Amino acid sequence: MSAELTKEKFIARLKNREGGEYLYQISVLKTPNENYTKYAHEYILGTETEEIGCGKLQLKGINKIRRKDSYKYSHSKTAQSGSGRGEEWFVLDLFEKNKEYAQKVFGNVIDYQIPLKNSREDKRVGKIDFIYEKDGELYIAEIKAADSDESAMKAIIEVQTYYQIVDKEKLLEDYGKSPDTKINKAIVLFKNAKGGKQVCENELIKDLIDKFDINVVLL
C-alpha cells in the first residue's frame, strides 16, 4: 500500500498534468481518502472552476468538441459477448436485457457508450456511459460499478467534463429531440460502494454535487 501524499504533493499532482490529462483522469483523484477529498475540494473550488450563475460552477478550460459524425452509431458489442469494464457491461445489460428495470429507475435509456471525440486529434477524450430521458429532460450519466472503489469525486468531475465537451445542440438533433430540451448531468452509484457512501455521508462531496448541479441516482 502506497504512502499517503501530503497536501502539497497531492495538489502538485493535480496541477502537473501529463500529456493533456483531464482533471478526472489523474489517479490520485480516484482514491476515496478523506484527506484527499478535502484537498481536492479546496483545490478545485479555488483554482479549477468558474461561476456560471445562480451559485453554480463549471470547470475552466474544458472546450466543446464539435463532432461531425452523429453521436448515434451502431453498437457492435452485446451484453452476452464477454466480460469487460464493469460500468460498460452493466450499461449494456441495462440497455439490452433489463429494459423494464432501466425504465423504472431512469425512464427511457436512449443510448450508451456515446463517443465524444471528433477525430484522432482529440486525445484522451472518453465516452458518455449512457444517456436517458425522464420527464421530458435528457440526462448525461456517468456510472460506477457495484464493486468500484473509486471516489465519487472522480465521477463528479468526469460527468462535468463530458457535459462541457458535448455539442448539446447536435446531441439533441442526432437523437431527434426538441432543441429546447433541457440536458442534465447524473452520476449513478451503488449504495454500498465507496462512492455511493460518500454522496450520502461526505459534506464536501455533497457540496460539489450541488455546485455542479448534478443529479445522483443510487442503486
Image (cartoon, helix red, strand yellow):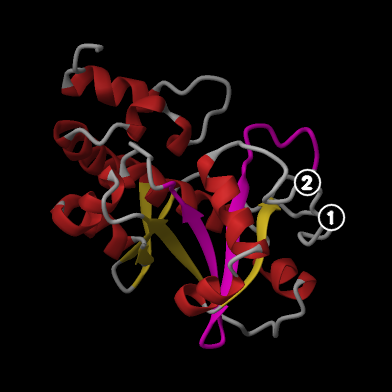
Q: Is residue 129 magenta?
A: yes
- The amino acid sitting under disc 1 is Lys
Kind of element beneath mark 2: loop
Inter-mark Cα distance, 2 to 1: 6 Å
Taking the spot 41% from the left edge, 58% from the top edge, the residue there is 187
Q: Nearer the viewer, residue 143 or 117?
A: 143
Taking the spot 69% from the left edge, 48% from the top edge, the residue there is 80
Taking the spot 32% from the left edge, 74% from the top edge, the residue there is 54
Kind of element beneath mark 1: loop
Q: Which mark is residue 118?
A: 2
* 199 sits left or right of 29 in the view: left
Taking the spot 81% from the left edge, 48% from the top edge, the residue there is 76
* Quadrant of the image containing the N terminus: top left
- Which residue is denoted by mark 1 in the rendering? 68
- The amino acid sitting under disc 2 is Asn
Q: Pinpoint residue 106: horizontal percent, then vertical percent.
A: 49, 74
The stretch of residues the image draws in magenta is 119-145
* Quadrant of the image containing the C terminus: bottom left
Circle 1 crowding by C-alpha within 10 Å: few under 14, some 14–19, many from 20: few
